[in-house]
Image (cartoon, rainbow, N blue to C red):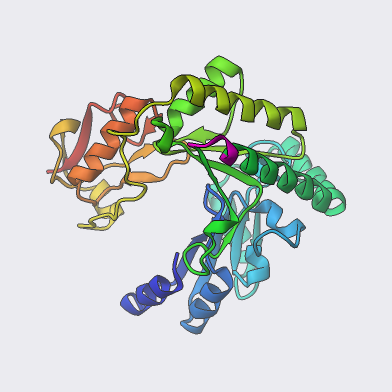
Amino acid sequence: MSVADVEKAIAAHPSAKAILVNNPTYYGICSDLKRIVEIAHKAGMLVLADEAHGTHFYFHEDLPISAMAAGCDMAAASIHKTGGSLTQSSILLTRRPVNPDYVRQVITLTQSTSASYLLLSSLDIARKNLFFKGRAMYQKTMDFADYAREEINALGGYYAFGPELVDGDTVFAFDRTKLSVHTRDIGLAGIEVYDYLRDDYGIQIEFGDIGNLLAIISCGDRMMDIERLISALEEIKRQREKSPIGLFDHEYIDPVIVMPPQEAFYAKKRRVAMKESTGLVAGEFVMSYPPGIPIVAPGERITADVLAHILFAKEKGCFMTGTEDMNLDYINVLA
């Protein structure tokens, strides 16, 4: 998110109550969170941070600023992703003027009264471990990721991007623990390289999309694990490299918003063949998961680029979700 875009959005929507920011994105990219908080608070708005992949920011000075340190009002920190607790366990952080007692009251209306004390205990153990050992854990992780980036870039064809992307605006900071690799220049979609790593080399990474793969490195990895990954990528390049002509090359498509998503989702809809949906308004989501970022959302027009993205991702083997039709042959559009 650029600061200028945030300022523009606030000016266009003066009645808005809050700004939601990912800190970081799945790929490790961070916005200028501190400046965004200053602008939002000046406009009387709250800032809510999705820190699903930012738990570790609190435990090393060389990592991007954490949401709470930047002055955010609430932050959801998924300790289970990069902090070591069991899956499904997270912590919701708040600060005044958000009333923690009111937040707790709302949570009791929406969550189970049968809490998992196994998960709660794992959060407490992880919190203690992070407090005493967090800095050393993430120093090791950054060292591994920096080494892997350097070696993968030396292979040629791949681009393991990192802090060099920082421009002080839309890429304000980069999470060095993330190992994101652009694969399109070797003629393969990220999901194809992901499949080869898993099926041919027994290496399970986080995910692949149409142009990139992502490996989440942790202090639990060993140097031999990093070397195995580098060697496997070298072999895949040697055996599978081809011309990138024909690969889908849009990293992001600006949405054409026709109506709010809630209104569109509950509107009267009809079912059409996916391949015949160009120009129509979507009544449901279409997402590649992970990371689950919508290619199209309810209320957005299905343009030719959007349809091409959907069909390409499906052809390459991305796990597609969001539609009633699990095969993605059909999509619900506004009647």
Question: Eyeballing the image, is 229 above or below 303?
Answer: above
Residue 166 picture location, percent across and down: 54, 62
- Left of 270 or right of it: where is 266? right
Question: Eyeballing the image, is 258 above or below 211?
Answer: below
Residue found at the far right of this picture: 132
- Left of 41 or right of it: where is 306? left
- Of residues 201 and 301, the one nearer the viewer is 201
Q: Is residue 154 magenta?
A: yes
Residue at 28% of width from left, 36% of height from top? 310
Residue at 14% of width from left, 45% of height from top? 280
- Of residues 164 and 3, the one nearer the viewer is 164
Residue at 22% of width from left, 44% of height from top? 305
- Left of 202 or right of it: where is 269? left
Number of numbered labels in the structure image: 0
Q: Which residues are magenta?
A: 153-157
Residue 55 picture location, percent across and down: 67, 52
